[in-house]
Structure formats: C-alpha cells, structure tokens
Image (cartoon, helix red, strand yellow):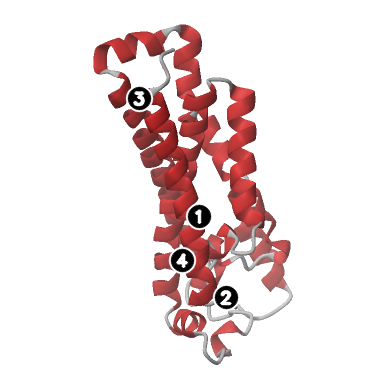
C-alpha cells in the first residue's frame, strides 16, 4: 500500500495516470525505491519470522528428537526445507497478486510509464520486449520473484537447521543474501522489470543466486543426514 500511496501522491501534480504494469510493486516506480529495498533486501529475515526458523523451536522444545524418531532425519530435514520454500513462495505470490489487483483497479486505463514505453535500447531485447508487452513482463518477473522468495525461505530454513540458534541463523541468512544483493550480478536485477539491464546481466544474476541458494540447503541436508547426530 505504501508504494501505491506514493504513486498517487506523485501523479497528483500531473494529469497522467500510471499504467497498471508500471504501478506494479516490482516495477519500482516510486521515488527512491524504498518499499522494494525494505522487502527484497531483507527477504530471508521476513521468512524466518514467518516460520522458516521453526526447526530452532523444535530443537529447544525437544520436539525435534521426537519428529526425527518418527519420520527419520532425512525426511525431517527435507520437509523443513521444502515447506519453507513453499510457504515463502506462496507468500510472495499472494502479496504480488493482491498488489496487481489493487493497481489494476486504482490505475485502470492509465498510460503513464515515465516515458519508458516510448524508449527503446538498441541491442537490449529484454527491455524492448518488456516495454512493448508490460503485462507479460511483470508476470514473468513475478514468477521469478516467487521462485527466489522460495529459495530465500529455504536459505532461512537451512541456516536454522544448521545452527539451531536464532542469532546465528538470522545473521548468516542475512549475510549470504546481502552478498547476493551487493555483488556485481546483484540478485536485485532479477526482481525488477523495465530496467536497463538485459539478458547478459539478468541470466548471470539468476545463475549465481539460484546456484548459491540451492547449494547451501543441499550441503546442510547432506551434513544433517550423514554427519549430524544431535
């Protein structure tokens, strides 16, 4: 809602109404991109709070031992990681879907895109296709965002399973995610449509992020099954 309010304030001084696709949350049309920064930069923390850290609660209450004795260590670890992925991905989907419905209603028949729809960048097929087909662009980026959100949740679950301590789980999740945000091929590029970054940037960004966010849960799973006997 903060994003929508900012856009409404922005267009008060003009006769233009934002195009719904460009008013969509991931498009980042508000000044300073503050809502996007608050969400995306701290994504694993939100999902840890949402429940990705429940393995720590299991450990502290002793319920972990009971569950492992019933279903086995392998299934226990796998269910924690997969459940966190699913809940996190669905949470992102619901959030973006609600936002899309709201902007479609509030900015119905809008055409304002801050001039982006009139722009073309030579050699940038992704940008050119996106501004020509804005709704397809936000759908594709939303799907990617939901997958990355799921992986962020899996990261939180993995650090929780590994450390079994909230302060270390939260700190390590944030540190790993922040490295993905700040590196040359930032994960942020994969969340936001209508930017100047083309496939040559988006694909490496996705490759790095997905590789890291799959490898870490895999390592934690193998370690938990083969070596951790707590």
Q: Which is closer to the viewer, label 2 or label 3?
A: 3
Neighbours of disc 4 within 10 Å: few (<14), some (14-19), many (20+): some
Q: Which numbered disc, 3 or 1, marks the residue that appears first in the sequence? A: 1
Q: Which mark is residue 104?
A: 4
Residue at image coords 49%, 39%: 155
Instruction: Say if mark 3 contacts mark 4, CB within 8 Å.
Output: no
The answer to whether residue 13 is left or right of residue 189 is right
Q: CA distance from mark 4 to mark 2?
A: 26 Å
Q: CA distance from mark 3 to mark 4?
A: 48 Å
Nearer the observer, disc 4 or disc 2? 2
For this view, does 136 lie left or right of residue 176? left
- Residue 50: x and y in percent read 50, 32
Question: Mark 2 to mark 3: distance in Å?
Answer: 41 Å
Give the Cα separation between the discs numbered 4 and 1: 31 Å
Q: What number is the disc on residue 197? A: 2
Q: Look at the picture and state if 61 lies above or below 201.
A: above
Q: Residues within 10 Å of mark 3 (few under 14, many from 20)?
A: some
Q: Is residue 177 left or right of residue 209?
A: right
Residue 74 placed where, x, y %?
30, 25
Q: Dot 1 corresponds to which residue?
A: 209
Label number found at residue 225: 3
Q: Mark on residue 27?
A: none
Number of residues whose C-alpha sits closer than 10 Å to that of mark 1, classed few (under 14), some (14–19) or many (20 or more): many
Is residue 211 visible in this depiction of the protein? yes
Give the number of marks. 4
**Where's residue 51, x and y in %?**
47, 29
The secondary element bearing badge 3 is classed as helix
Q: Residue furthest left?
A: 71
Mark 4 vs mark 1: which is more N-terminal? 4
Residue appearing at x 60%, y 43% in the figure: 176
Along the horizontal axis of the image, is 60 left or right of 83? right
């Amino acid at each position: 809602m903060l994003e929508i309010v900012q856009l409404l304030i922005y267009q008060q001084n003009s006769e233009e109404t934002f195009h719904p696709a460009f008013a969509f949350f991931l498009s980042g049309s508000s000044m300073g991109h503050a809502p996007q920064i608050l969400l995306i930069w701290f994504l694993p923390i939100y999902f840890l709070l949402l429940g990705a850290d429940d393995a720590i609660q299991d450990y502290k209450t002793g319920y972990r031992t009971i569950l492992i004795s019933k279903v086995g260590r392998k299934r226990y670890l796998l269910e924690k990681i997969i459940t966190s992925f699913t809940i996190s991905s669905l949470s992102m989907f619901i959030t973006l879907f609600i936002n899309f419905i709201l902007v479609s209603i509030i900015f119905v028949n809008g055409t304002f895109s801050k001039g982006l729809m009139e722009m073309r960048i030579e050699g940038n097929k992704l940008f050119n296709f996106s501004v020509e087909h804005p709704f397809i662009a936000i759908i594709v980026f939303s799907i990617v965002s939901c997958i990355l959100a799921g992986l962020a949740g899996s990261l939180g679950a993995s650090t929780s399973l590994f450390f079994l301590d909230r302060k270390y789980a939260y700190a390590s999740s944030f540190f790993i995610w922040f490295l993905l945000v700040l590196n040359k091929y930032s994960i942020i590029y994969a969340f936001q449509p209508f930017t100047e970054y083309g496939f040559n940037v988006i694909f490496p960004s996705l490759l790095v992020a997905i590789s890291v966010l799959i490898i870490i849960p895999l390592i934690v799973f193998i370690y938990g099954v083969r070596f951790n006997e707590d």
